[in-house]
């Protein structure tokens, strides 16, 4: 649980930094489609950092394995989805956009596995 809560917290900070970077340093340097892509990446990054934290807190008892898999899927989603959008926006290389849906799939799978973990949690 500590490992995933730590990783979630670091990703939350990175997502906030990415959003601030977009708002201040990139605001007048990127064309609108690229700025929008970067902001979308930061938005999903932050949401899934929080989701990873929720999974970390659910990682106990019979739900532990599923919650850890969900956290891993959220991390993979952040790397593929948000990472590809960051790279697309910063480099203009459209090839990165082909990776983005794989990250989206990882996000959806993470939510599904987290739901399964929730069913395995025992009432306190």
Image (cartoon, rainbow, N blue to C red):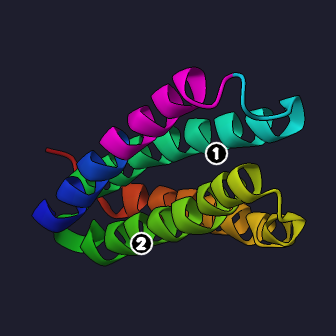
Where does residue 118 sit, x and y in percent of width and height?
39, 55
The residue that disc 2 covers is: 72
* Residue 119 in view here: yes
Which numbered disc covers residue 41?
1
104 left or right of 13?
right
> SS class of the residue under badge 2?
helix
Residue under the image location 35 percent in, 50 percent down: 11
Where does residue 119 sit, x and y in percent of width and height?
41, 58
Is residue 23 located in the magenta-colored stretch of the structure?
yes
11 left or right of 102?
left
20 left or right of 86?
left
Range shown magenta: 13-27
Residue under the image location 60 percent in, 61 percent down: 83
> SS class of the residue under badge 1?
helix
Instruction: Report the Cα–Cα distance between label 1 and label 2.
Output: 18 Å
Identify whether 30 is placed above or below 104. above
* Residue 122 in view here: no
Kindly indicate the quadrant of the structure image that contains residue 88. Answer: bottom right
* Nearer-N-terminus badge (1/2): 1
Badge 1 local density, few (<14 within 10 Å), some, or many (20+)? many
Badge 2 local density, few (<14 within 10 Å), some, or many (20+)? some
Quarter holding the N terminus is bottom left
**For discs 1 and 2, the disc positioned in front in the rendered view:** 1
């Amino acid at each position: 649980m500590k490992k995933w809560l730590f990783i979630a917290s670091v990703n939350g900070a990175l997502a906030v930094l990415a959003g601030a970077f977009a708002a201040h340093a990139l605001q007048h340097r990127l064309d609108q489609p690229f700025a929008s892509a970067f902001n979308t990446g930061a938005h999903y990054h932050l949401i899934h950092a929080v989701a990873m934290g929720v999974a970390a807190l659910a990682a106990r008892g019979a739900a532990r394995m599923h919650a850890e898999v969900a956290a891993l899927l959220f991390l993979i989603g952040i790397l593929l989805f948000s990472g590809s959008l960051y790279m697309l926006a910063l480099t203009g290389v459209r090839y990165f956009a082909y990776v983005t849906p794989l990250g989206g799939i990882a996000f959806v799978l993470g939510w599904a596995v987290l739901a399964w973990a929730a069913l395995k949690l025992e009432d306190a």
